[in-house]
Structures are given as structure tokens and as C-alpha cells.
Amino acid sequence: MSKMAPPEEVMKVDYSTPAEPWMDVKPEFKLGNYSYPGKPDVLKYLGLPNPREWDPTQEDWKLPPDWREIVTDGFRELLKKYRSLKVFMDVCVRCGACADKCHFYIGSGDPKNMPVLRAELLRSIYRGEFSVAAKILGKLSGSRKLEEDVIKEWFMYFYQCTQCRRCSLYCPYGIDTAEITFLARDLMNRIGVNINWILEPVANCNRTGNHLGIQPHAFKDMMDFLVDDIETITGRRVEPSFHRKGAEILFITPSGDIFAEPGIYTFMGYLLLFDYLDLDVTWSTYASEGGNFGSFTNDKWMKKLNAKMYHEAKRLGVKYIIGGECGHMWRVLNQFMDTMNGPADFLEVPKSPITGTVFNNAKSTKMIHLVEFTADLIKNGKLKLDKSRNAGITATWHDSCNTSRGMGFFDEPRYVLENVVEKFVDMPAQTIREQTFCCGGGAGLNNGEFTEMRLRGGLPRGNALRYVQEKFGVNTMSCICAIDRATLPGLADYWAPGVQVTGLHELVGNALVFEGEEERTMNLRQEDLPGVEGSEEDE
Amino acid sequence: MAGLVTAFLAVVALAAVAALGAGAGMANVFGIAVPYVAVAIFVAGFVKKVIGWASTPQPFSIATTGGQQQSLPWVKQAKFDNPSTPFQTVVRMALEVLCFRSLFRNTKLDNRPEEGRVAYGSDKSLWLFSLMFHYSFLIVLFRHMRFFLEPVPMLVTGVEFVDSILQIAAPTLYLTDVFFVVGVTFLLARRIWDPKVSYISLVSDYFPLFLILAIALSGIYMRYFAKVDVIAIKQLAIGLVSFKPVIPPNIDWSFYMHFFLVCVLWAYFPFSKLMHLGGVFLSPTRNLPNNTRMVRYINPWNDPSIKPHSYADYEDDFREKMIEAGLPVDKEA
Ligand code: SF4
Ligand code: SF4
């Protein structure tokens, strides 16, 4: 990563437009604004075309000789398969309502990060290659020929879109740039233009079950480690099971939760909750990834990776599935899973064994989100919670893009949060709920080499966070997405230093009061609880 | 800039063609042939486009949700921003089509680095002027029915009455004429002055605006200044719709200009972004309910041969390690 200027400097974004028309401006690849290409062996493993070593900063991208036909044929095919694409190519009026809605535009000022222009990168080819009228009018009608520079531009800007869908909310026709990005990436994959931080996780998920490539024994080791930590903290020995046939529930969460801070604390929260309820739940190392990296690639890989969840549920003979805190996992689950891999007729409609609540909103997929489950428990008074264990926390809530605009999870998580912390404030209205801003790392852009661009894209979220930090003393941002948990700490360190990031069930885990428990002196991070003897923060 | 100038010149040229042509005794062409051809192109083109969209499968249900989903019974659902039933979805669409719901939400970026703060102020100007433009256009169009229908229906005269309620000038000023021009002028001005919007604007964005403005202005000129022979024009209009076209004498050139520009708009419509009129109904992010966990949505080309890397293969790969770690396996080594 190149050296990042301080936030005060980065905030001074230049929103003026270049003198030349956008078609004449070539993308400039610099360390920090693009992600590294897919490695040849990964492409080979996935059966993707044109595996080779290549470097986006070099002139020659080593495209296959017939790349032009592949792309135009592919485009034609997608136009036949996706009404969304066809309509979105035709009806944009370039009103610009979406223009200043994208966090990457807000943070970079690059006009090609305006969603409308991002889509025009594709639309100009659509017109140039498929519309007779536009072909005759040429550049004037905003159409152009498919040249290598166009592919380079696609690579730059379709890998500078986190598919957060914020633009779609404001568009009078609901044009969804995330959908356009998804299909543009599909086209690029056909000629071997892709990024490694998506494809390697896809390969890992396929083979090992999770995107980090953790093998089953190592997965179990990590879990044991967290179980030990829980014992240190609470004095309880929780006993999670793996691959237990006939369990009532299969639990699947993004594998980031078991691997890295602060996800691991959320993971411990899950384990504590299940133990508290004595829930008949089992884990799987085979289906140990909730996140779907395939959805950043193409519809085939999205389906193939998602299929593991039902495959495993069927093999184990569980009744239904509960999913953990994850963003794009829920976009895929909510909107695609049943279509691709249903009907899940071997499962039952989820019914909470504790409260008896039947989750009719998951009648068909038979999969519910842990936050719904927990909210229902709290509402029915089934959890004894001690907010003071989270004393010292002034929390705010980050609505993850995918659980917001692909689903509509707003009140359930807030309800849970309000029941486990003493102080909660929302960020400004135009930056939360459906209008929420992206963490900058979605859709496979959470890699190291992209950090600079991601932090720039983090401006709107970071700034809103800083606002509540200064005004209300917010020191904790909670969320239900694993990519957020990976990305937001860096974002907070940069834009609002001093704010920590937690998952929701980390805070639940802290607050849970077990019957006859020994008094807790530390939270799940093994920090002294406020007010406890020996506490350094005791004021 | 090139787009702006080209579009402007194109509209001027079109207006000149009609004005001169009609004056040069080509009234038959501009009064009869052109309108028939234009309407035929409009209808055929529109239908073809809509069929093209509608016959393409929508593989996934991709509603963009704008509020709380249907969830537990005690959680209040935002029924019309995040609909879960067909009825709620219809209401959502109606709000979109009739009230421009999404534009109503529009915000404006306000980056104030000196204060270290980015704000997002509500910006309803685009919503207001687009709404003004579209509704005036609709009413003006509706008022024109009086030329094509004999007797003129009550509804049309009623609308006219309300529209001219202020009774200014002679002939009485229609309010919608004013709103229409204000609306289209705002849209044009915004396109020129907002650098973001001008950067993305193409000829095909300026052209319809200039064309529509020219139609409005020529209409206003006819009505308020040239004070054209309305009876004669009605004769022509009724002749056209009853397929017994006649060219009455004494029709001012300005009418042919106005009429020709309207015909150009008809013919241009299906090949342009104006098709958002049809497209807005077909947008999958808005016209689908968010009920995909409740009801299975079918993708016609869903490929059942795409299967996961199976558990059995996975176990084959890792069996020894799994056994060693004490994980249960299906097949012992
Ligand atoms: S808001 Fe929609 S119609 Fe307007 S420019 Fe953006 S994508 Fe196009
Ligand atoms: S989906 Fe998000 S990242 Fe992509 S263009 Fe829209 S606002 Fe920007």
C-alpha cells in the first residue's frame, strides 16, 4: 500500500470533471486503486479460461486472441438471460440522481465512479455493438467499439464497485449497478480478467468449505481454542459438536468469524448463546462458509457454493438452518438460494424450540438469521441479560449494505442491541438504514493492495461515525457482517480513531447471565469489566 | 458540449424543414403522410421493445428493499418500501410511477472539508420539476383530445376549465403550458449547469429536451400569438383519426411545424431513453416483492446439473485428518 494522506487531506476531494469527454480518459493503474489478478493455478483449479501471469499496470494483458468475440457473444447471451440487464441498458435517462450516492465517487471524485457512468462503460458497448442506430451515430450517441482499453476500464471500475446497491435505492427506475457489475465481472471472467482475492476464496470454499482454506482439523483446533477462551472468561465449558447427524439445527456463519479479531468474539457469543439455551445445534467444517464469494464471480459459482448449505443439511438430517452474522451471505440467501438450490423440502419450517415462534418469513428457504432468532428470544423474555457488562460502551449501529438493501433487516438488530447495551445512538439519518453507506470492502474488495481506495471509499461511513463519536461519545460500532468486521476496524482507525468494532452476538455473549454462574470479571475480549476490582478503566 | 450543440442544431433543422416545407405547398406530406408513418413507427417500436423486455426471463428476484422487511409479528414492516405481497408491490409501483417515490428520497452531497464533515442534504428539486414536467405533459396531451373527439367529452372540457382557471390573457392562459415550459427548462438547465450531469450527457439526452421544448414553444406561439384557425386544425385531426384525411386551407405554417416536431417525437420515442415510460414498469428491483424466503422464485434457466463439491469428495480429501482430529466421518479409513 502506498502511503495514505491524513483524513483531513483525503476529505478534500476534487469533484470537478475533466476537460476531455470520459471516453477519452484512460484508466491509470496505481498501487492502491486496483486488486491483483487471479493466479494461474487458481484459475486452472476453477476451470476458468486463460490462466496466465499478468499485471494490470503493464500494456499487454495477454488476452486470448478471440477475446472480442468471447465478450460480445457473452454479452448477447447475458442479454437473453437477464431481463434486468436488458432493461437497465435501455432505460437509464442519465438524470444523475445516482451520481453522488456511491461511496467510491464521494471518496475519490472520479466521475467514472458515479454509478451512472459505471454502467455507461457497459452501455456504450451495448449501443456500439448491438444497436444499428447508435452504430451509425457513433460516438455522438455515446456508443463505442470494444477495444482493449475498454476492458481495462471495466477491470478498473467494476472492481471499484462493492455491489452495495445504494445507487439503486435512489434511481427512479431502480437501476441496480450491483447487477450490472455482477454481469460485467461475468463477462471479464470469460477472458481471464479477474482478481485473485475473489477467485482464491472461491477455490478454497469449494475445496475446504471456507474461504480461508482452513482444513477440517485446523477448523476444529480453532474452535477448541475459542472454547478454552470461553472457559477462561466464564468458567463454563461449552461443548459444540461437529457433523452431528440428527441435530435439530445446522449453524453456518462466515468463516471470518472463527479466524480473526474481532469476528472471533462474535463466534464466542454464538457458542455461549447456544450453550445457554442448550440448543440442539451442530456445526460443519464442510459447510463452514456462510459468505458466498461465487456471487462476486458469476451465477454458476454462486450457485455451486451456495448449494453446500442444503447438501450438508440434508446429509445431517437437520430440521432447519440458522445463519450467522454476514452480509452478502444474506443477500444470496434471501434473494437467490431458494431459486438456485431449492426447494428445501427435506427441511421443516423453522420453529424456535425455546419460544415456539414459527418463522413463516422463512417458510420456503427454511433458513433464518440468528438475529431474528435472538430478537424473538429477548422479546419473549428467554434471555437474562445484564447490560452493565457492556457498560462503558456507547454503541452505534452499522447497517450492512446487503442486509439492508437486499433484505430489510433494520429493527431486529437494533432491538437486540438496545437490550444488551446501556447507551445506543444512531448515526445521521441519511447514512443509516436503507441509506446506509458501505464499508468499502464488499464484493471481494477487502484485500490488502486495495486499502487506499477502500479507505477513500470509507469516507462517508467514517465521517458519519466520527460525527457520533464527537457528538455523543460513541466508542463502539456494532454490525452483522463479517466483511464489516474485517474492514470497519481499519476504517475506524483511519476516520474515527478510538472506535472499536463488534459483532452483535459478541455483545449478547457479554451480557448473557447464566444461572448460578461465577461472577465475570472480563468481557469476551478478556478486558476487565468496568467496575470490577482490578479494573484499569475503573473511574 | 458537442452533444448540446448537435442536439440544438438538429431540432432547429427539423423545425425549419417543416416550416419551409409546409409553406412550399407540401402540406399533404406534413399533414398526412408524416403523422401516419410516425404513429406507425411509435406503436410498432414501442410494442417490440416492451415484448423484447417482457420475453426475457428475470432469473432472480432482486427487489431493492427500502425499509424494514416483513419479520416477526411485533416488528413493523415498511409495507410499501419493502413489500412482501403482490398487493404491496403494486402499491410500491404506483408510488414510483405516480409520485416518483425514489426521486423524492434524493439527497445532495455536501462535502465540507474545512469543517471536517460530509453532509447529505435532502434535495427535492429534481423530484419537483420532473413531477411538474411529466404531469403538465400528461395534461397538455389530454387537453389535445378536444381536437380528435367530437363531441368533446366532459372530462376534457373539465380539465381545460380547471387548467385555465386564472383567466389570464386572451386566449386564456393554460397553467400547464407554463409549468410544462418551466419543467423542461429546469431539466435542460440542470443538464447544462450541473457538471456531474453535463459530463454524462449525450446528444440523446439533449435532443428530446430541445425537441419537447420546441414543441411547447411552437404550440404556445400558435395559440397565443399566431392565433391559428382551430376549427380547421380540428378538421384535419378528425380526418386523420377517421382515416379520411383532408387538408383544410388556411392552416398557418406554425401548425405544421408544431405537428411535425410532435411526429418526430413519436417516431424517435421507441429508439430512445424515452422508453423509460415502458421500462419503469419492468424494473425487477421495484416490481418484485421481497418474499424470496417465503415463496420460491423460479428461474427458467436454472441449471440443475450444477452441484456442490460433494461432502463425500470432501471427506475423501480430508478423511485421515478428520479422524485424527476426532471429527465424525461417514466412511472409516
Ligand atoms: S439514477 Fe437511474 S436513471 Fe438516473 S442516471 Fe442513475 S441509473 Fe440512470
Ligand atoms: S452498487 Fe454501490 S459501489 Fe456499486 S456503483 Fe452503486 S453505490 Fe457504487
Image: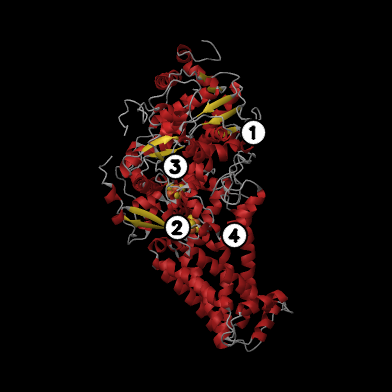
Asked if badge 2 and badge 3 are on a common chain, one would say: no
Q: Secondary structure at mark 4?
A: helix
Q: Quadrant of the N terminus of chain B?
A: bottom left
Sequence-first tag of 2 and 4: 4
Q: Amino acid at mark 3?
A: Trp
Residues at marks 4 and 3 touching, judged by CB atoms closer than 8 Å: no
Q: Secondary structure at mark 2?
A: strand
Total labels: the figure holds 4
Front label number (4 vs 3) = 3
Sequence-first tag of 1 and 3: 1
Residue B41 shows up from this direction: yes
Chain containing the residue with disc 3: A
Quarter of the image for residue A381 reads top right
Q: Secondary structure at mark 3?
A: strand
- Between the C-alphas of marks 1 and 4, the distance is 36 Å
Whether residue B199 is situated above or below residue A168 in the rendered picture: below
User: Where in the figure is residue A71, as x and y percent of width and height?
Assistant: 47, 45
The residue at which mark 2 appears reads as: B107
The residue at which mark 3 appears reads as: A397
- Between the C-alphas of marks 2 and 3, the distance is 21 Å
The residue at which mark 4 appears reads as: B97
